[in-house]
Image (tube, grey):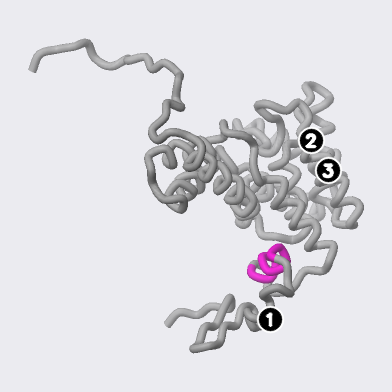
Amino acid sequence: MWKTSVSKVEPNHIITRGYRQEDLIGNVPFTHVFFLLVKGRMPDEKEARMIDALITSSIDHGVTPPSTHASRIVASAGVPLPTAVAAGILAVGDVHGGAIEQGAKILQEWVRLMHDNKWSFEQTAQKLLEALKKEGKRMPGFGHRIHTKDPRTKRLFELAAKLKITKDHIKLTLAIEARFAEKKPLPINVDGAIAAIISDMEFDWRLGKAFFLLGRAAGLIAHVYEEMTTQKPMRRMCTQEAEYDGPWEREI
């Protein structure tokens, strides 16, 4: 038998996390309900506003990200909207959209170590970066292929401070950025900001991709709809030349 604490469905009766679904409809904003679904309780107004900001910060980033590119290419083949959007969602992984999850995992682990060992934020940042370097890894959530200073990061951190959400994970992230700045500036990007904020809000790091998916799905829908309604089917989108490096032409 399956067990779930998310919803109970009976004839003419739907309960979600203890609330009648008809009572939620039109009375509780979507971000509140998302928080309820994953946390099991309603957010306060500050938490709800922060969640709304996090989701909004991930809605879209142009046509070049793999998820958007995948959705538009698949849409150009004449498939239904859900299929094309799903193609974009399937393109989200550890490299594209995964830095939130990876960064949150590292931050949560090292904040625990910081408390256990009574290190300062500066000491923790240094030890963290040294450990990653020894393992041949990079700190997720820093640097960007387009932005030298991600405009979304500043806004999210300003809001987190205003709402009194800022705690040790954000502070450690800022300490890491300061360590980078001593050698080569590597600013916090939006993924790093979200990783720090959801960690300070006590979300499990395994929910990291959820915040990206929830926001980006809206952008993918817009791109797919635009592709379906304004562009020709099977239009040429991949204009980069392909160089063949296989075996020379040969006889059977």
Query: Marks 3 and 2, Cα distance to the nearest angstrom?
Result: 7 Å
The answer to which of marks 1 and 3 sits earlier in the sequence is: 1
Kind of residue at badge 3: Arg
> Residue 45: x, y in percent?
84, 66
> Residue 223: x, y in percent?
55, 41
Label 3 CA crowd tier, 10 Å (few <14, some 14–19, many 20+): some
Q: Which residue is farthest left?
A: 252
Q: Is residue 62 left or right of residue 161?
A: left
Q: Is residue 198 above or below residue 131?
A: below
Label 1 CA crowd tier, 10 Å (few <14, some 14–19, many 20+): few
> Which residue shows up at 14% across the image and 12% down it?
250
Q: Is residue 92 visible?
A: no
Kind of residue at badge 1: Asp
> Which residue shows up at 50% across the image and 42% down it?
229
> Residue 159: x, y in percent?
86, 50
Kind of residue at badge 2: Pro
Residue 155 - label: 3
SS class of the residue under badge 1? helix
Query: Marks 2 and 1, Cα distance to the nearest angstrom?
Result: 38 Å
